[in-house]
């Protein structure tokens, strides 16, 4: 099983269940390949938060942004 790095666990620690269920799969993907970090964006309206791998961010780092 893939283990999330401590930085990802800390990032998720104070987040609500809906946020975690949205972002965790991308964090798991990042932890599996260990190549890229994750960018989490907030889109106003119905879409809410989204996450994706970002090759400009080092592995183990999460950047929150507004889209």
Image (spheres, helix red, strand yellow):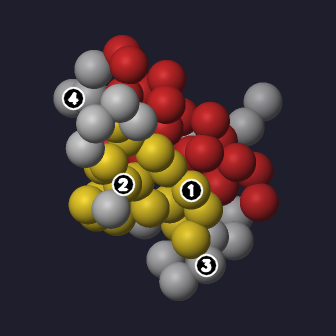
Disc nearer the start of the sequence (2/3): 2
Q: Secondary structure at mark 3?
A: loop
Q: Which residue is mark 4?
A: 14
Left or right for 3, reference 17: right
- Tell me which corner region of the image, top left, top right, bottom left or bottom right, holds residue 52: bottom right
Q: Which residue is mark 2?
A: 41
* Structural distance between the alpha carbons of marks 1 and 2: 9 Å
Q: Secondary structure at mark 1?
A: strand
Instruction: Give x and y (percent) for residue 43.
Output: 32, 48
Residue for point 44% across, 61% down: 39
Residue for point 62% across, 36% down: 25
Residue nearest the observer in this picture, 46 or 54: 46
Residue for point 42% across, 27% down: 20
Residue nearest the observer in this picture, 60 or 18: 18
Instruction: Give x and y (percent) for residue 55.
Output: 61, 78
Left or right for 18, reference 34: left
Left or right for 26, reference 2: left
Left or right for 12, reference 2: left
Disc nearer the start of the sequence (1/2): 2
Q: Secondary structure at mark 4?
A: loop
* Structural distance between the alpha carbons of marks 2 and 4: 17 Å
Q: Which residue is mark 1?
A: 52
Q: How many marks?
A: 4
Q: Secondary structure at mark 2?
A: strand
Please identify, in this view, whether the residue under mark 2 or under mark 3 is nearer the observer: 2
Residue farthest toward the front in the current orientation of the protein: 45
- Tell me which corner region of the image, top left, top right, bottom left or bottom right, holds residue 18: top left
Q: Which residue is mark 3?
A: 55
């Amino acid at each position: 099983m893939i283990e999330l790095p401590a930085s990802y666990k800390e990032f998720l620690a104070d987040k609500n269940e809906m946020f975690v269920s949205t972002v965790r799969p991308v964090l798991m993907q990042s932890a599996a390949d260990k190549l890229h970090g994750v960018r989490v964006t907030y889109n106003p309206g119905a879409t809410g938060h989204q996450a994706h791998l970002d090759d400009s961010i080092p592995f183990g780092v999460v950047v929150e942004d507004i889209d």
